[in-house]
Image (spheres, rainbow, N blue to C red):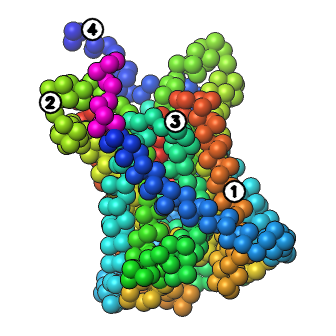
Amino acid sequence: MQAALAPTIPFTARKPRRVLPGFGLSLGYTILYLSLVVLIPLAAIFLKTADLGWNRFLQVVGTPRVVAALELSFGAAAAAALVNTFAGLLVAWVLARYEFPLRRLVDALVDLPFALPTAVAGIALTALYAPNGLLGRLLEPLGIKVAYTPLGIVVALVFIGLPFVVRTVQPVLEDLDHEVEQAAATLGANGVQIFLRIVLPAVWPALLTGFTLAFARAIGEYGSVIFIAGNMPMRSEIAPLLIVTKLEQYEYAAATGIAVVMLLISFFLLLGINALQAWSQRRLLGTT
Amino acid sequence: MSAAKPRSNQGFGRAALVALALGYLALFLLLPFGVVFAQAFSRGLATYLHALTDPTARSAIWLTLTVAAIAVPLNLVFGVVAAWTVTKYDFRGKSALITLIDLPFAVSPVISGLIYVLLFGAHGWFGEWLYAHDIKVIFAVPGIVLATVFVTFPFVARELIPVMQAQGRDEEETALSLGATGWQTFRRVTLPNIRWGLLYGVLLCNARAMGEFGAVSVVSGHIRGLTNTMPLHVEILYNEYNATAAFAVASLLALLAIVTLAARAALESRAPELKRATKTAGGHP
């Protein structure tokens, strides 16, 4: 065995197998364009913040208004992602498992929040939930105020985040072997038991990925939120809006400081998503 | 087969779940969408058309088309080259490169605008040099294009990578061994294979380019008739309590969303393999 393999080892070790021409050109162009458009501009924000120094940075991002905005952004994003985890699982389940009229249309409709510009979603939701709006009028007598409150922010983020959960969970549900569920049913398991013992264990990595994607998107969301939020400092002012406000007041240090905090958290979430996906893929390959 | 037939209470549970899901989607997705058109036509067709033919509206529509016409081709070329690079060659750091291509998705739109202000704004790195040479980037069209290129950067690559990964390299390698040049191989073998995926990526890229709000808002300066794109025009009209006109312009963007989704559905029925590849890859906007 060893002898048979030996001659090929030095050959493959020297150079990976690249049959197609143009490697240098393609990789060079990819890295150049990536650097010019994405990496160098993003680096600017970190270098700008490094100029501030640690103490000034903490001072800038530690003001009550900034802390309140960051807390609101992360809190509302987490609440909305949680709502979407349940609603997304329900919609994905119905789309993956049941036949009903207009199923394909509904399936396409789920992507509407991806396709609809955020500003359009923002003014539409505000018109709906304003005190004189179609839904606002119904909710007002119940004492529920949605528009111009933190609840309105959550509603906007729920709208934005739904497709993330549906689109990560749906393919897993479609792949899931029906026979296992049917076997469980013939052995006397009821619907709830089948769901908790068979479906949920298979689907929860996708569910977690969907939650994280929706959460990450919601943290930075701007267009759909600012119309419905009311934008009161300390109460309903999200972090991205505060960046814009600071920028308009020429407070660059504060704007970049908030941006760096948000970016760092987003990057960690992105790494987490990648790790999650790699892990769940390994898990799938391992079990089947 | 008969074993799969639902018992009656199972059938009821099924109907209840479908009704619940459809009710949720109607309330949270369809209703906001319908409101756009209801509000746009609330004062009749004449007001609607007037809002769209207003000179500032027309210049906003024109600017949006121009920006998309620059940003989409740039990212189209990049997307094809990047997808080709990561699927047709083996090299170290490939997965890091794929993660970096996704990076703009993880950045808040507002921050995507902010980075260009820090580079090209009056107090930015190149601010003084640009001022001395009388070149305007921020609060001008070039800044809007840059911010749009940034936020739509990953779309084409993201759609193509899974498609090309699934297709492998055999066909290209065969073409080469039969004497085709690299360019011929790309044009005659690769391009026809990826055309639907490419169209799909371009559609999504274009929808985002035309609809982007946050990033563009930061760099635009909101100069009416000059640096206002359609989404920014919607915002200005809305903030001026001219809701009907705001929804009229918004209805055009909503139509764009419908056309995008319809084209996407049509592409998926033409090339079913797309559905799989893109849906698993792209829980992304």
The magenta region covers B1-11
Q: Reading the chain from its start, which is encountered first: label 2 or label 4?
A: 4
Observer-side mark, 2 or 3, equals 2
Q: Where is residue A270 in the image (x, y as percent from the top left)?
A: 37, 56
User: Helix or strand or loop: what does disc 2 sit on?
Assistant: loop
In the rendered structure, find residue A4 and report the number of the disc placed on it: 4
Label pair 2/4, CB-CB below 8 angstroms: no
| Distance of label 2 from label 1 (alpha carbons) | 50 Å
Q: Position of residue A71 (x, y in %)?
A: 32, 78
Q: Are marks 2 and 3 on the same chain?
A: no
Based on the picture, tell me whether residue B64 belongs to the magenta stretch: no
Does residue A69 appear to the left or right of B131 in the view shown? left
Q: Which residue is drawn at 68% across and 61% down?
A: B253
- Identity, as a three-letter code, of the amino acid under mark 2: Gly
Q: Where is residue A44 in the image (x, y as percent from the top left)?
A: 49, 71
- Identity, as a three-letter code, of the amino acid under mark 4: Ala
Q: Reading the chain from its start, which is encountered first: label 3 or label 1?
A: 1
Q: Residue A268, located in which quarter of the rendered image?
A: bottom left
Tag 2 residue = A188
Q: Which residue is drawn at 51% across and 63% down?
A: A40
